[in-house]
Image (cartoon, rainbow, N blue to C red):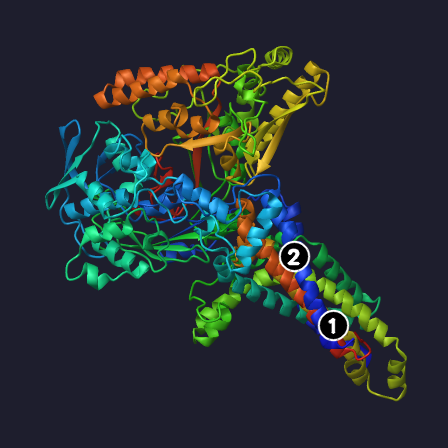
Amino acid sequence: MNKKAIAKTTLMLLVVIVILLAALLGVTIYFMTRQPPTEVVTLPTPAFVTQNKLVYESGATYEWLDPHVSYYQYDYWILWHTVETLVWYNKSSPVDIIPWLAESITKINSTTYEFKLREGITFQDGTPFNATAVWFSFNRLLIIDGTSPTGVHGSQAAWILQQLVDPNGELFTAMGAEPTYDEGWVKKVLDLNFVEIVDNYRVRLHLKVPTTQLMAILAGPWAAIISPTETVKKDYEHHQWPFTTEQQPAYNYTKYFIRMAGLGDTYFNVPENGWRFGTGPYYVESVDPTTYRIVLKAYANYWGGPNHMNLPPQGKQRIQTIEFLYQPSFTTRLLDLKQGKATAIAVAEADIYQVVDKDLWLNQGVLKSIIPGVNAYGPIPTLNTWWLNFITNVTNPDGSYRDWQPFADWRLRMAVACSVNMTYVNIYVNNKLSQLAYNIIPPGTVPEGSYNPNIKPKFYFNLTLVEELIRDAYLNPLKSETHEMYFYNGTRIPPGVVDNTFSAEKPRVIEFYVQSGATTFIQILTTMTENLNSIARSVTGSRIALQFRVVIVPGGQQYTLASRHQIDAYMGGWIADYNHVLNWLMPMYYSRGTYPSWNQWNITALDNLYKQAVEADKEGNTTKLLQIVDQMNTIANDLVMYMVWWHDSEYYIRSAWLQGWYVNPVFGVDIWSTMYYESP
Amino acid sequence: MKLYEYIIRRLILLIFVLFAVSILVFYFTRGFPRGIAPWAAYIHPKMTAEQIQQVIKEHGFDRPIYEQYFYWLRDVLRGDWGLTGAWAQGKPANEVFFNHFPYTVELSVFATIITVAIGLPMGIISALKNNKLPDHVCRVIALAGYSTPAYWFGFMLQLVFFYYFSVWGLPNLPSSGASTLGKPNITGLPILDGLLTGNFVYAWDEFLHLILPSFSLAFISLGFLARIVRASMLEVLRQDYIVMARSKGLKERVVIYRHALKNALIPAVTLTGIFFANLLGGAMITEYVFSWPGVGQQALRAIFQGDSNFILLYSLVFAVIIVLANLVVDVLYAFLDPRIKY
């Protein structure tokens, strides 16, 4: 064979590649040059329809799937398909809580409620739902005591129930106690008698303090009722404890509790081989910790929810399988949705206009999908607020107190807050995807009237005012020597400790921390710093006297630094754990709450009002409670305690084959047990 | 110097390389920009202030950054690579790493096979048809290969072989993920385990899932390989012994395959080892696009979460792989080319 022949042979091998690349090039050119499609691309019936399964793809992964451990939105979504609570929301209502596993509820006195349980309901492992299961579930939540295997979230959701039985912080960590998790402690918890078994289908819950929050608290995933036998069996296997010795011939739940005291490491966090311990419409078939794939299967003996409201309409077939898949790339997710591999995908706000018609939304407020065979639902307001936090007492990394405390100065907080036109950025940067906030409380918060748009922020876009404020702060800097200033603990800051002087000789920097990937926030904060830097330069006549910067850090880092008071300002957000205004007042305004303690705000007036709000709640005096809420919002707005931005809404991108869609805004999730497939 | 002396010398050098890499990565993850609390993964909400202080003291988190390094080194030498954050359920970093590593190995092996299977003939044909149409075609492909962003090429493959093949009613390849028809439970390598356990459906499905990501990953390196083989082949074809072989009247096939190709392949063979190591470490973006459950994807998540323990482990393992691959290549060179002496 000569050289020519050899070349011919090897050339053959290349033909395939050339064709491949030519095809690729052709497709690319086609897409780059084509006009918008005039005809609808018809795909065969999607595989998820023929297989009667729902495939959801997102860039999120689960953390802990044990409802008594979990404290994470994505976990809750999975949990709502598998476990149920005594009470829950009436379909898409965020306020109408109805008996669910309970048949009826009777208020015996201000701290005692009797729940008549539904009969004939079975857990997915075949055991009956009854009063023992309620007693077991609530006590398990209390006894695990808010632990998680790593404790990454700090206190887990157990505190929500614990506040009802341990208001003085005598037993539980989150309430302020430092317990030793031994047999004696378990006995003390059980002696609280939070759940009293009246008979097989009747329990009484005994609270230590009256509250109107009870039903909202019991409607959360942490209050899920689970099968005691399945739970004990699986946890004994997981920890290789002597099941036969301790739990046979009869189950001894107290022994189980002693072992589980303060222990968040449970089988159900990552149930690789699935679980069947709920009463919900689906059970967990498998969880793959390598691919993060979670498979749920329809529970054949599911009771259907009150009036069968948690199942598809009669004659429609239930979706048999639900798959939660991890797909970090949005482009791939979108392709999967278009092709029919995925039924539903997660779409970040920044990507929403790849799916919906931007002009239609911006001009007419109509959310319409631009992808054939795909529906867009929303906006659904959720109980959520975003804002910029100001830390008033910043410490150095070595723990010492910093002499530069810009946000202890109202003028600088106000200057920062006035440096951007929030109405404008919400339209042109945020694409009108949120509702501007007037104060920290979002619309829809219980009791009705908690959200009051008449309590408006003190700040407004005004660059002249910004200049005046910065000039004043420049000429008359805040100093502990000349001003009355206080540490977070209430003691006076001695003279010489704080000196907010800034000049070319004493240059200062103010940093806004924001987490990477939050593109909208970064864009807005960058605009703010540009405005502020320009004004600071003109006021001080120096480029370096006072500089503003945006610092982008990995997710979570800003919170770590904020909790140690080491940064000036950072973006913060809160989504209500449960829908009640007290769940906002505590973390946002009370000095021992999350954000005031991080931001080092200790306002006596707010503390007093918070205590009055708790009292008003105990009395069931809604009018008084709402008045207090208004007062607290007014004080916080006057102080510019937070630069409130907006309340987010949720958007749902789903295949048009999915019918009967609804969402509950409290947890921001759509529940697929009621849905079914039908040709769009 | 004898070969074994050379190997020992290189292995000693490896220790210094790892030392340098670990110092750099340690500084960038723990000391820059500032203060991710590295003890966050170790503490528990139930811990008292004293217990938290104990953890901080034990791992040296209260020490200056250069001292912290030695505490970390001490822990690593004891086999404790630290814990991950909630993104990996707080598992030990090494457990997370080695759960996912086989997937990356599998992907890289296939990508290497594709690189060799396509890059090698491309290089040969380019050399034999020097400056003619086939050479130009190969040059375009090679250039496209190493100038195309991996994520874009990945999306294009998904668009054509997954989406449009579906639209056209053709059998399509999976867009992303690994097979769900089985579990790797012997070696951790899904296809191999599928074959070993007789689960051929799983092995085949996994193979189908591998095609797009491995081709996407290989596209960069096959261009390089083709260019190297071409250059090497051209050089060999001009050697006197090739002229001699032809003048002796040997058939062109014998001249090319027996005399020219053997020598021209020396740099290609050695470079393949480097390619494999680079593919192992460079699969991060491909794994992201294709949701491939390899270790690169986990590293990306760890970076976003600022998880220094996992990033340190990832960097060091790949530093070892790259250095060892270079060593193997050097040694291989000596075997393949008797002129090379160390």
- Given residues A402 and A66, the one toward you in this image is A402
Structural distance between the alpha carbons of marks 2 and 1 = 20 Å
Q: Amino acid at mark 2?
A: Phe
Q: Is residue A358 left or right of residue A376?
A: right
Q: Position of residue B178 (x, y in %)?
A: 49, 61
Q: Residues within 10 Å of mark 1 (few under 14, many from 20)?
A: some
- Snapshot quadrant of residue A118: top left
Choose between A568 and A526: the one closer to the eye: A568
Would you name the residue on which mark 2 appears?
B19
**Of pointers 2 and 1, the one earlier in the residue sequence:** 1
Tell me the chain of label 1.
B
Do pointers 2 and 1 mark residues of a single chain? Answer: yes
Q: Which residue is at 25% across, 54% downward?
A: A231
Front residue (pair A41, A420): A420
Q: Quadrant of the N terminus of chain A?
A: bottom right
Disc 1 designates what residue? Answer: B6
